[in-house]
Amino acid sequence: MVSFSLLVGFGAALGAWQVGRSAPPSQAGRWVDAALVTLLLALIGSRAAYVALEWPYYAARTGEIFAIWQGGLAWVGAVLGWLAGVLLAAGFWRISIGAALDGLGPLITPLAVTAWLGCWQSGCGYAVALPAGAWWGLPAPDESGLVASRFPLQVLAALLILAHDWAAAAFLYPPKGSGLRAALSLAAVGVVIFIASLLWAQPTRRIGIVPLDGWFGLGVAATGVFYGLWYELVRSRILRGKQRRADGHQP
């Protein structure tokens, strides 16, 4: 748990720094403040979601609900906490949701990458043990702490999220205030979690053949894609309206 906490803490600090660096210089301070509030909401959300998922255990041990140092965080709650931070920033400053997504979007990739690396060190989200001599394996523990050479699922998931972030920065130039990059980053995280969950060897709840986390991943990915489609639909309507007004003023 210590290594997981350190890695995710580093990801949180890096994300807050990127939020400040991405903001206009005159507004960097307030966006860093918003990032810190959002990180707190993500922490609260991840703990609340974990407790909800494990409620039969915590119902008999209510004194452990707030014992976050014992471990127990659910990534889907962190996503909900991040979304709450986005909505809070949009409402408090009276800016568009797209602008709030742009401002707090830089938190997504550092947190997702360091969470996956933390899982690699702490025995969550692991894949099957490989035969002796498999060159592509990496040592990784399971939930009991047993270390074995395993398919490097957590590392590959972190690399896929990094690759998406690099490709988006290199080739995607969305309109300012659109929130599209953040929405696509969220979708990428959801897709990676869905695929990775199908390869997990850890005991986990399932609905059908898909782990519960995989369904959550699909839901998060669908949310990001839906926002992108909604934004493009609204923008196309606005552009058509402007074109009709321009045509109406032509002699």
Image: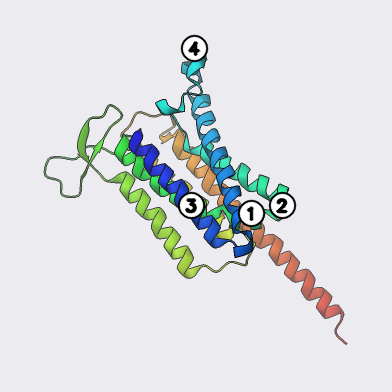
Question: What whole-number distance in Å separates the C-alpha atoms at marks 2 and 1?
Answer: 9 Å
The Cα atoms of the two marked residues, 1 and 3, are separated by 15 Å
Q: Position of residue 41 (x, y in %)?
A: 57, 38
Residue type, mark 4 in image: Ala
Q: Which mark is residue 158?
A: none
Compared across the picture, whether 95 is left or right of 193 comes to: right
Asked if residue 231 lies left or right of residue 142, the reply is right
User: Mark 3: which amino acid?
Assistant: Gly
In the rendered structure, are the residues bearing label 3 and label 2 in contact, judged by CB atoms less than 8 Å apart? Answer: no
Residue 159 vertical position relative to residue 197 in the rendered view, above or below? below
**CA gap, disc 4 and disc 2:** 42 Å
x then y, percent, for residue 94: 74, 53
| Residue receiving disc 3 | 15
Q: Provide the residue designation for mark 4.
A: 60
- Quick one: label 4 or label 3, which is nearer the N terminus? 3
Could you tell me which secondary element the residue under label 2 belongs to? helix
Q: Give above or below for 85 relative to 235.
A: above
Q: Badges 2 and 1: C-beta atoms under 8 Å apart?
A: yes
Task: Kindly indicate whether the residue at mark 1 contacts the one at mark 4 (C-beta within 8 angstroms).
Answer: no
Look at mark 2 in the image and give the residue it sits on. Answer: 93
Do we see residue 176 in this rendering? Answer: yes
Q: Residue furthest bottom?
A: 251
Could you tell me which residue is drawn at 53 percent across and 25 percent down? 52
What is the crowding at mark 2: few (fewer than 14 residues within 10 Å), some, or many (at least 20)? Answer: few
* Residue under pointer 1: 100
* C-alpha gap between disc 4 and disc 3: 37 Å
